[in-house]
Amino acid sequence: MHHDGGSRPPGRLNEYEAKQVLRDAGISCPRETLLTDGEIPGDVDYPVYVKICSRDIVHKSDARLVTHASSRENAAAAARSIRERARRIFPDASIQGVLVSEDVATDDSRELILGTTRDRDFGQVVSLGIGGVSTEIYRDVAFRALPLNRGDIYDMLHELRGRAMLGSFRGSEPVSLAALVDTVMMFSRMLERHPEIVAGDVNPLMVDVEHAVAADAYLEVET
Amino acid sequence: MTLEKLLRPDSVAVVGASRTAGKVGNIILQNLARFEGDVYPVNPGADDIMDMPCHDRVTDIGPVDMAVVSLPQHVANQAVRDCVDAGVSVVVIVTSGYGEVGNHEAEQELLDIIDGTGTRILGPNCLGVFNAHTGLDTLFIPEEKSARPPPGNVSIVTQSGGVGFMIMNELGHVSNYVSYGNQADISELEIMQAMADDPDTAVIAGYVEALKDGRAFREAMPGITSRTPVVMLKAGRSARGREAASSHTGAMAGSEAVYRGVLRQTHVVQTSTLAQTIDAATALSRCPSLRNGRIAVVTNCGGMAVMETDLLSSEDNGFDAILPEPWRHRLQLADFDSALQDRLAEQLPEHASHGNPIDLGGDADADDYRRVLDILAGERDIDGVIAIGTLHPASIDGGRLALVFQRFATRYDRPFLVSLGVEIEGRTEQGSSEYYRPVSRISLLEDAIQEMGIPVYGTPERLANGIRALHTYGRYRLLDEKDF
């Protein structure tokens, strides 16, 4: 990872920075703009998510620092109120801006969670699980140690109890297995190239019949 | 260096050999009476023990492959120094009081003693090694308390001496048994590598609380499991279980979900109970693995076949079908086409069911089984056959049925598993040294069928444990053939 000469690298990348690393690895992310000040550009497609962008704020949804906005006007208002709310409830947090991120969900989208952690026994591991609101209840997540091959990723999917939701499900066609497996593979190769990444999550990884997109992400690097 | 001498030493010294019945150094010497190699008692306080001349020190013997140290902890390390001086290849330290009780200094000292030498250490705090083929036996469990099983083709590697011993007894046969305790030096991975190289080992069954080196395991294990199936019971899955494991062997047991993933990744068949471990090892040591999951069931007891069907059936979840080939293979009852059903109908009693499961009816005899199995033997769309039933009806002659099974197993190159049900009465035979074993007509017949190399299970559940292991390892084999 490249950091400006002289400055100490941050322990935690904010969402915008984390997604730059993911994009460099070839992983699709939503089109988005980091507002540090000023106006939302004119070429944004709505609806969007408006989110606080800070290396210090971990659970931005829980703190109600994420808003869904369907127009430029709503998004601009949301950006102002989120910035104010963040300053009020996290007075010590350094804030890098407000992220306006196009909503990539389609009618067929399913939410997965793709992550990494450093395991005491096996070193860098990749996790892939069923995402969404019940993630923490069912803990339906498969782990593999680096390096991964495509067979390992198929087997991770096969290990998930809730994998039926990736197939024909509620009138939706099965998700694109190729897009999903490619994304996990790119994530795994990114971790091999960057052993300094000690933890991180893509949550949710939005997968539909065509694409797999990292809708939100954070990464932690060794400092 | 090679650990060949761990499983196949030509000579063994017992350091701390004792004349006193009941002492560890006496029990080990007694147990080594059947060892085909040379045995040397070592004890400076005795001239001879059990009619064998006793040596003052290991260095007095001359070349010796293995030494068992059964001394109190405060003098054990000095004995290990002697073993290094004598050029012993493997020192088995059964003594406890090391890392497992927080005495890490004494354990580190062991490593310092062998550092840069050709000597390796098994243990400390272990039961050591048993080889049913050569009679090598360092286990300090008296023969009269537990008779050793006859030679077989399953090797057991265990962090807990006691649990491994239970697995060995329940299996009823064994090739090598190695209890490694604190694994100060020799790791579970090195032991499994030696077992995979051992011509007498067809399957490795392991009990593990914490791996010595997870990264080395992840790297080397595929090279073992591609040659030899490995069944592993990973214990210490709960938070309290991990605590217990930590005080048991002084090693921390890792996260359950990560272990599960890495075991799948390295093609280890993971189990979570003793019964699953024994049942999986039994099936894998007697059957080829499943190439696909389509099973035929033949029975003279409809209820048992229904239960087996429930256990084997997994629903099509609508996703696995888009995964590549090996993950699409569900365990399921095979669909019989009309041609097969017609052929079965020609050979079967009128009231029998010609679908799958094939229910011969309660009045079936051994010949009915034979006719059905003859037909199934040639069916290439059936990947394995289960015969499940009861011997209680008057029409069934157990001996003849066993011969039918034997004839089928000889010509069938795919998995064939049997359950005869369990008999509750007449389980114990008083006064026998094998007092713990159920002894009945059925169990004697089970033994006879096991002798034929056919896996036999008491219940539909345990048979399902066996066939699931064949299915899992079969998927691993198919994956090994692919290049992802």
Image (cartoon, rainbow, N blue to C red):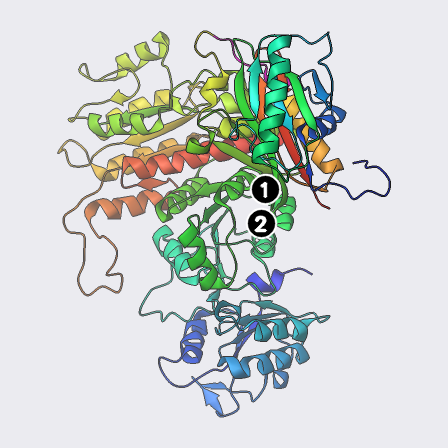
Q: Residues within 10 Å of mark 1 (few under 14, many from 20)?
A: few
Q: Which mark is residue B442?
A: none
B75 left or right, relative to B431: right
Q: Amino acid at mark 2?
A: Ala
Report the predominant secondary structure element of the magenta stretch. Answer: loop
The answer to whether residue B369 is above or below residue B247 is above
Q: Contact (CB < 8 A) between labels 1 and 2?
A: yes
Q: Residue at x 16, y 26 (%)?
A: B362
**Closer to the camera in the image, B458 or B392:** B458
Q: Is residue B446 visible?
A: yes
Q: Position of residue B104 (x, y in %)?
A: 57, 71
Distance in Å between CA atoms under marks 1 and 2: 7 Å
Quadrant of image for the N terminus of chain A = top right
Q: Are marks 1 and 2 on the same chain?
A: yes
Q: Position of residue B109 (x, y in %)?
A: 63, 75
Q: Secondary structure at mark 1?
A: loop
**Closer to the camera in the image, B234 or B350:** B234
Q: Which mark is residue B227?
A: 1
Q: Residue at x 18, y 33 (%)?
A: B396
The answer to whether residue B343 is above or below residue A125 is above
Which residue is tagged 2?
A: B196
The answer to whether residue B59 is above or below residue A182 is below
Q: Position of residue A163 (x, y in %)?
A: 47, 23
Mark 1 / mark 2, whichever is N-terminal = 2
